[in-house]
């Protein structure tokens, strides 16, 4: 699993870490049941504070992508499996939207509105 952060990005580091994990799930490189690195190991690897790594894991837990288990660390949850299946459909939707002149941010807003 490859997690990268850009300290010069305006996007918070914890969000960059969470986005990297999401991308790995969508690409099928990590699957339900896979263990993520311990927060301390992750923090050292990407040179961030351990609390930043923990916050990323907590965000992923709140989204249902990760289960945080005492003594076992962070594990990709079973509910993450449908994401990989939807990746192709989401890509097709974004491409179709672009062909129609609809920005990805607009698509995201529409999807978010549908969830309300």
Image (spheres, rainbow, N blue to C red):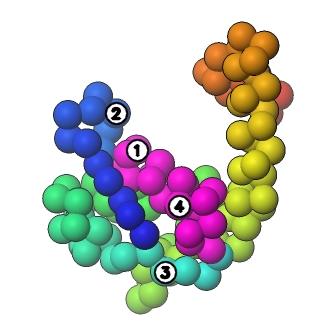
Between 97 and 49, the residue placed more toward the observer is: 97
- Which is in the foreground here, disc 1 or disc 4? 4
Q: Earlier in the sequence, mark 1 or mark 4?
A: 1
Name the disc covering residue 11, or none: 2
The residue sitting at 32% across, 38% down in the picture is 12
Dot 1 or dot 3: first in sequence order is 1
State the separation of the CA atoms marked 1 and 2.
7 Å
Q: In the rendered structure, are the residues bearing label 1 and label 2 in contact, judged by CB atoms less than 8 Å apart? A: yes
List x then y, in percent, for residue 93.
Answer: 78, 32
| Residue at disc 2, secondary structure | loop
Q: Is residue 60 left or right of residue 27?
A: left
The residue beneath circle 1 is 15
Q: Does the image show residue 18?
A: yes
Q: Which residue is mark 3?
A: 35
Q: Where does the image place residue 65, in percent across and percent down from the top left?
A: 61, 62
Question: What's drawn in magenta, residue-wise?
Answer: 14-31
Residue at the image point whose x is 75% and y is 18% from the top? 99
Q: Secondary structure at mark 4?
A: helix
The secondary structure that most of the magenta stretch takes on is helix
Mark before the other along the chain sequence, 3 or 4? 4
Residue 89 found in image quarter: top right
Name the residue at 29% across, 68% down: 42
Tell which residue pokes out farthest to the front in this image.
99
Query: CA gap, disc 1 to disc 3?
Result: 19 Å
Q: Secondary structure at mark 3?
A: loop
């Amino acid at each position: 699993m490859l997690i990268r952060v850009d300290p010069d990005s305006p996007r918070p580091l914890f969000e960059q870490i969470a986005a990297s994990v999401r991308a790995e799930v969508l690409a099928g490189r990590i699957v339900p049941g896979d263990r993520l690195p311990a927060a301390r190991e992750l923090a050292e690897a990407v040179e961030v504070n351990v609390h930043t790594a923990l916050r990323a894991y907590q965000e992923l837990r709140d989204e249902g992508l990760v289960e945080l288990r005492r003594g076992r660390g962070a594990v990709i949850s079973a509910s993450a499996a449908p994401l990989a299946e939807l990746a192709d459909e989401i890509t097709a939707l974004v491409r179709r939207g672009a062909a129609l002149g609809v920005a990805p941010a607009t698509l995201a807003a529409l999807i978010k509105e549908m969830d309300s």
